Image (spheres, helix red, strand yellow):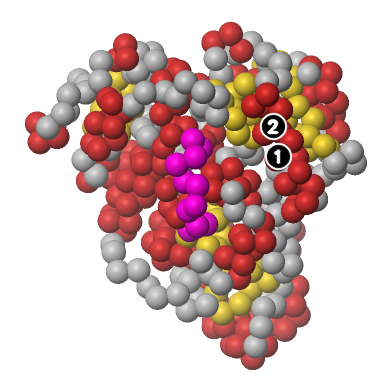
Amino acid sequence: MTTQAPAATGFDLPEPEQLTPALLRAWAWHRQGLDGSLKGADSAEVFSMAGWARSVGGANPYLTLFARAGISRAQADDDVLSLKIHELPAARGCTYVLGHNDFAWALQVGRDAAVAPFRVLARMGVERGEITLLEEQILHTLAEAGGPLDPRQLKDELGDSVRNLGEEGKKKGAATTLPTALGLLQADGRIRRVPVNGRLDQQRYAYTLWGLPAVTMDDASARSLLMERYLGWTGGATFKQSQWFTGFTVAASKAAIAAVGAVEVRTGAGEVLWMLPDDVARLAAFEAPDEEQIQLLAGTDSMVLLRRNSADLFDERDKGRKVLDSTLALQADLPDHPILDRGRIIGLWQYDPAKERIAHWLFDGVTAATGQRIAEVEAWIRAELGDFRSFSLDSPASRKDRIDALDAAG
């Protein structure tokens, strides 16, 4: 496709040779607010400006807020309690922590994923009316309880209303009809899932009534809004990257890109990025900072996960580096958490709770800035989290080999 800006944009595209990997890394770093530009922002503002935080029962949402705005775990938990932020199924039906202004339309773009499990039930003879009745009984049970109930409590209260689908259901990931009904109610904003102990990094949940007002936009408008947010969060992405995050079809992706007036921009590496018109003008004037800007992030941080392009964040001389015989730049997802400087991955880390320390490997050795930031994040994890889990099943034992490998490399 020819690289040219629409006539109405009123600006010139940057020359491809200007858009080097180093400049684009620094640009994405800036758009992510990792350069200090989000200091003083509240939790909802961080997620609105930098992107929704992938949760999966890990500590990424907390570090997302701490790295960009210095927000404590206690403040984040308070914001969850007061519904300023919440964990909801959004893009692709995956759970993200996001701000209150996004709740309704984020549920809307993720609703198809909530409907999909019913198709599995339908093939096992479960009719839609049975699930609708179960939804109503869940709402009644939660209203009678007057507070949150976890899935086991709900199942006990609902009794025979929850159908056991036997071995066939287990094989298809649907042991009973309860999860499908809960998913549909959550996608409609009629119930919400709350962490049992108030923490986002320990995946034990209960359900409570909600009653979120319905969104007023149609599906196409919601998809266009997600595309606009996504391109803003990333500072520009390929068509394939946008499809991976949104889960849209090719036709829906093209329609959403057209609706937001996105512009094709060719990079020095020959890659074509779709960018918002305002960002094209900003990128043309952007200069990478001269001084170090060090951050320790989670492997699921928006900087890495939104485009799933960790290979692009390594300097060319670091792309052959290995941990446990696996070449880092060849993996779709990082096996360890990254240490970055202005968008470039300069090392890896894991938290070792037994010794209350961060095990790390810095490719070019420790500088004053990297040493200081490692110490700051280490103290924060020790005082506020106790451990740094990547996902719900992560444990100190499961990451021991990776900790040993980073120690050996570093």
Report the quarter where the N terminus lies: top left
Q: Secondary structure at mark 1?
A: helix
Q: Eyeballing the image, is 251 above or below 173?
A: above
Instruction: Describe residue 170's horizontal placement relative to residue 108 as left or right.
Output: right
The outermost residue toward the left is 7
Measured from the top left, where is residue 279 in percent x and y? 29, 35
Q: Is residue 155 magenta?
A: no
In contact (CB < 8 Å): disc 2 and disc 1 = yes
Number of the label disc, if any, that sits on residue 306:
none
Q: Nearer the viewer, residue 308 or 97?
A: 97
Figure quadrant of residue 295: top right
Q: Residue at x 55, y 63 (%)?
A: 86
Figure quadrant of residue 76: bottom right
Number of the label disc, if any, that sits on residue 372:
2
Q: Residue at x 68, y 24 (%)?
A: 368
Q: Eyeballing the image, is 233 above or below 223?
A: above
Is residue 126 at all visible to an observer of this figure? no
Instruction: Describe residue 189's horizontal placement relative to residue 349 as left or right.
Output: left
Q: Residue at x 14, y 34 (%)?
A: 9
Q: Nearer the viewer, residue 305 or 62?
A: 62
Q: Which residues are magenta?
A: 34-44
Measured from the top left, where is residue 154 in percent x and y? 70, 78
Q: Residue at x 71, y 28 (%)?
A: 371
Number of the label disc, if any, that sits on residue 376:
1
Q: Eyeballing the image, is 276 above or below 175?
A: above
What amino acid is at disc 1?
A: Glu
What amino acid is at disc 2?
A: Gln
Residues at marks 2 and 1, CA–CA distance in whole angstroms: 6 Å
Magenta stretch: dominant secondary structure: loop
